[in-house]
Image (tube, rainbow, N blue to C red):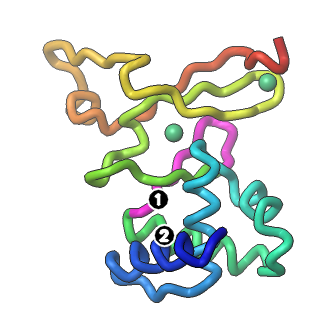
Amino acid sequence: MTVVQKQELKRVLREVGLRATNARALVLGCLMDAGRPLTHAEVCDLLGEHGYDRATLYRNLVDLTQAGLVTRTDLGDHLWRFELAGAEGHHASAHAHFVCQECGDVSCLPDDSVSLNAWRGAPKSLKQKNVEIQIRGVCNDCD
Ligand SMILES: [Zn+2]
Ligand SMILES: [Zn+2]
């Protein structure tokens, strides 16, 4: 991460009222680079070289989530995955996720790849698109 990137990340953190610590900037940058939801364990692996302990990284993930920068999803395997919240506070459900049944890999699908059409009497949460859309299948690597 360059110095400029780090400063930019810290600016984002301050904007939402968080203290701009190095660990927080790293965790946020890690999720930005990933472009897909990451588990706590994956974040720990990716940031391993920086020497932060797992509890610190977890706490920062939770702080970022509470500040609204990051959303947290459980895709049915009882693991929390964290991903960058979209612009204007989009819920993670604004797009669907593809989950590989073989390797468990999760990727984000483009916004318009799956469309949700509410019908009469549909649950309110569905109308508000406050739901999670998950597509399960086999990824190209496992095919
Ligand atoms: Zn796979
Ligand atoms: Zn996603």
Residue at the (44%, 34%) spot, across then down: 132
Q: Earlier in the sequence, mark 1 or mark 2?
A: 2
Q: Position of residue 124 (x, y in %)?
A: 20, 32
Quadrant housing residue 139: top right
Q: Position of residue 129 (x, y in %)?
A: 29, 33
- Vertically, is 50 above or below 97? below
Give the numbered dot on residue 26. none
- Residue type highlighted by circle 1: Val
Image check: 56 left or right of 130? right
Magenta span has 70? yes
Count of marks placed on residues: 2
Quadrant housing residue 36: top right
- Residue type highlighted by circle 2: Leu
Name the residue that disc number 2 marks.
64
Image check: 44 left or right of 22? right
- Say what secondary structure mark 1 lies in: strand
The N terminus appears in which quarter of the rendering? bottom right
Span highlighted in magenta in the image = 69-79
Question: Looking at this view, is 51 or 60 the one in front?
Answer: 51
Residue at the (75%, 22%) spot, across then down: 101
- Say what secondary structure mark 2 lies in: helix
Q: Residues within 10 Å of mark 2 (few under 14, many from 20)?
A: many
Q: Position of residue 97 (x, y in %)?
A: 54, 30
Name the residue that disc number 1 marks.
70
Distance from the alpha carbon under mark 1 to that under mark 2:
6 Å
Q: Position of residue 34 (x, y in %)?
A: 63, 49
- Vertically, is 89 above or below 21? above
Residue at the (48%, 53%) spot, across then down: 84
Magenta span has 50? no
Question: Looking at this view, is 105 or 26 the one in front?
Answer: 26
The C terminus appears in which quarter of the rendering? top right
Name the residue furthest left: 120
